Image (cartoon, rainbow, N blue to C red):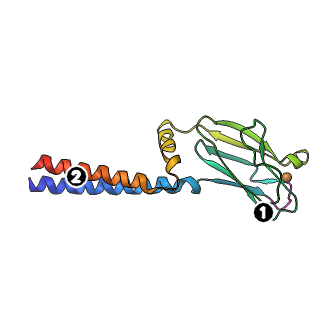
Amino acid sequence: MVLIRGMLRELLVLVCLMLISTSVAGATATNESDIVITVDSSSLRFSPSEVTLTEGQAVRFMWSGQALPHNAVADDGLFESGEPARDVDYRFVFEVGTAGTHAFVCEPHESVGMVGTITVEAAPVEVVEEIQEELPVENTPSVSFMSSIMVTTFAAAFAARRTE
Ligand SMILES: [Cu+2]
């Protein structure tokens, strides 16, 4: 019986470690996976102008101190960074359901070829739940961490009682 309990404890520690590592990775993924689009040195091109991402990921249009004011407006109306500006930091999350190709332009410079394309690939089904769960707790990653600990504690207490 002691041997079994020892093995159970090792198993629980392992499960606990796995839960902690996945919740930490999930909490930090939101910003690390952002795709940044800026303006190149010619001042009339997006860089990069063509990107591919997965539903749930975000694109961040970001530039500062530009000689000319720019914006980023989707042809299909999905997103718009606002009025053209020399300093822009605009983040747009491509939620589930936005899979497809989204062409966008810089309104003042569309005629000289300041255009781009964002290709959004559908998220795998198991990732959908994860994204919806994470969005409200974006700034409080400890919530999922705490729930993992609580689940593990309950499991440990339950397992210990059963082996007695
Ligand atoms: Cu422009």
Quick one: SS at disc 1? loop
Query: As drawn, is 41 to the left or to the right of 151?
Result: right
In the picture, residue 12 is in which quadrant? Answer: bottom left
Which amino acid does the dot numbered 1 rest on? Ser
> Mark 1 near ligand 1 (CB under 8 Å)?
no
Which labelled disc corresponds to residue 64?
Answer: 1
Q: Nearer the viewer, residue 68 or 113?
A: 68
Residues shaded magenta = 40-44
Quick one: SS at disc 2? helix
Residue 101, given in percent of the width and then of the height, sits at 70, 37
Residue 5, given in percent of the width and then of the height, sits at 14, 54
Residue placed furthest toward the right: 111
Specify the principal SS of the magenta part. loop
User: Which residue is labeled 2 in the image?
Assistant: 156
Which amino acid does the dot numbered 2 rest on? Ala
Q: Identify the residue at horizontal 16%, vertical 51% (top origin).
A: 160
Q: Can residue 131 be spotted in the picture? A: yes
> Mark 2 near ligand 1 (CB under 8 Å)?
no
